[in-house]
Amino acid sequence: MRGRSDVLEPAILGLLHESPMHGYELRKRLNLVLGSFRALSYGSLYPCLKSLVDRGWIVGTESTPGTGHAVASKRARIVYQLTADGKEHLQQVLASSGPSSWEDENFDVRFAFFGQTDAETRLRILEGRRTRLTERLETIRLSFARTRERMDEYTLELQRHGLEQVEREVRWLDGLIDNERGHRRARTAGTGRPAGADSPAVPSDSVDTANTTEKERG
């Protein structure tokens, strides 16, 4: 259960950082963001929301019901939003780039919020993920080479399919890493200034005064 919370918590905080949401809307967004959580249930979501409220990272307030009879008869919804402590915690999570950030169960969540993550951290996570998959690819290839003679055609095709999936993801990561590095080079080049460009500008009236003085001396 803790493993699922480790994935859900940053996903919830990341979505609430974009805008406040009620539970139903939050569940829909989570199902879109987290591919492996398509069947996310309220039984998983609400205990996690309660835990985040208890820690002071989010707060829930009842939305004001509308004025129509049909609307007024509906139960008020709880709208959740991020607190200042929650924002601070989210920034700490998004700034982390240890091995857990590129493991299978966490990488998709971290990647979904790359828009809120700084460039250096994005690059470290992508490179870590590529290294992990490259190691996995080598293991699969060795296993495939050793056991292919003993496999029937369906098991062999399944192994080949798994190998191709990892190869595709490695190529995808290569493109993302090249793109991140290109952006970083562009930003670095964009900050280049000629020597002395940071020196304080001389006011024009000072220049005019100096020129007048020189003419008087002449």
Image (cartoon, grey):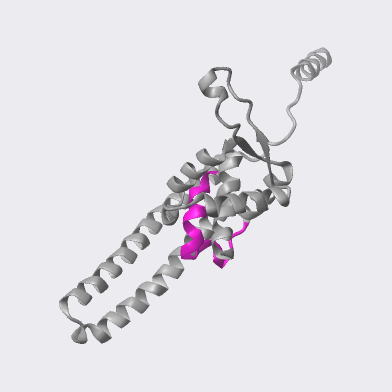
**Horizontal and vertical percent position of residue 94:** 60, 52
Name the residue at the left extreme.
153
Give the percent coordinates (x, y) of residue 3: 55, 64
Q: How many marks?
A: 0
Q: Is residue 157 magenta?
A: no
Residue 16 sits above or below residue 140 on the image: above
Taking the magenta stretch, the answer to whether it contains residue 98 is: yes
Which percent across, then down, holds residue 147? 25, 85
Prevailing SS of the magenta stretch: helix
Task: Please tell me which residue is depicted at 25% across the width and 83% down the height of the picture.
Answer: 145
- Image quarter in which the C terminus is found: top right
> Quick check: can you spot residue 152?
yes
Q: Is 190 or 73 nearer to us in this picture?
A: 73
**Residue in the foreground of this view, choosing between 205 and 210:** 205
- The relative height of residue 82 versus residue 179 in the rendered view (above or below) is above
Query: What's drawn in magenta, residue-wise?
Result: 96-115
Percent coordinates x, y for residue 95 in the rendering: 62, 54
Quadrant of the rendered structure where residue 172 is? bottom left
Closer-to-camera residue (186/80): 80
Question: 60 above or below 160?
Answer: above
Q: Judge by depth and name the residue closer to the eye, 180 or 141.
A: 141
